[in-house]
Amino acid sequence: MRTIYLIHGLMGTARHHFGPQLQEWETADNVIPLDLPGHGVRADEAPLPYFQGALAWATEQIKRHGRGHIVGLSLGASVAIHLAIEHPDLCESIVLTGYAPAIPAAMVPLGW
């Protein structure tokens, strides 16, 4: 059984952004949808600077549940690629979709 982590995009949730994949994969795989800080079922506030806090949180979740395949959409893709670079031992593989390799200058004041 594979472990697959799903990391959503900005202002979304893992269940919303990956609904069809969850339906298909949950029957055969250990699928773990991760709602980043300040999103979805999470009651906590989003940390500042946001990206570093989200990356640290996702890393801790994967350390807790174990190595796996990481699927990231948009913001989740950025988290996935940084996680793979910093912790390759946690990543069986990564799938990136909607990935923008640079943070726009207009977002820098938001703590990115």
Image: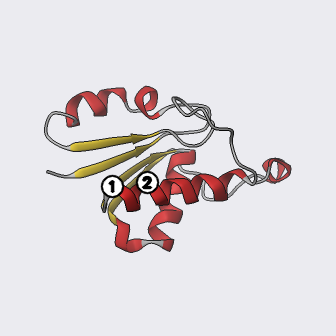
Q: Residue at x 21, y 35 (%)?
A: 26
Rounded to the nearest angstrom, the CA distance separating label 1 from label 2 is 6 Å
Residue nearest the observer in this picture, 67 or 76: 67
Residue 13 higher or lower than 85, as above or below: above
Residue 34 higher or lower than 63, as above or below: above
Residue 80 higher or lower than 26, as above or below: below
Residue 9 higher or lower than 69, as above or below: above
Asked whether the viewer can see residue 80, the reply is no
Asked whether the viewer can see residue 104, the reply is yes
Q: Which residue is drawn at 34% across and 43% down?
A: 32
Type of amino acid under label 2 = Gln
Q: x, y (%) of residue 98?
A: 51, 44
Number of numbered discs visible in the structure rendering? 2
Name the residue beneath numbered marker 1: 65
Quadrant in the picture for the C terminus: bottom right
Residue 38 occupies which quadrant of the picture?
top right
Secondary structure type for disc 1: helix
Q: By what rule are the colours in the image chosen? A: secondary structure
Q: Which residue is drawn at 49% across and 64% down?
A: 83
Question: Callout 1 environment at 10 Å: few (<14), some (14 to 19), or many (20+)?
Answer: few
Name the residue beneath numbered marker 2: 61
Secondary structure type for disc 2: helix
Type of amino acid under label 1 = His
Residue 19 occupies which quadrant of the picture?
top left
Q: In this view, does 43 lie to the left or right of 41?
A: right
Question: Callout 2 environment at 10 Å: few (<14), some (14 to 19), or many (20+)?
Answer: some
Q: x, y (%) of residue 37?
A: 60, 42
Kindly check if marks 1 and 2 are in contact, taking CB atoms under 8 A apart as contact: yes
Q: Is residue 22 left or right of residue 109?
A: left
Q: x, y (%) of residue 44?
A: 63, 37
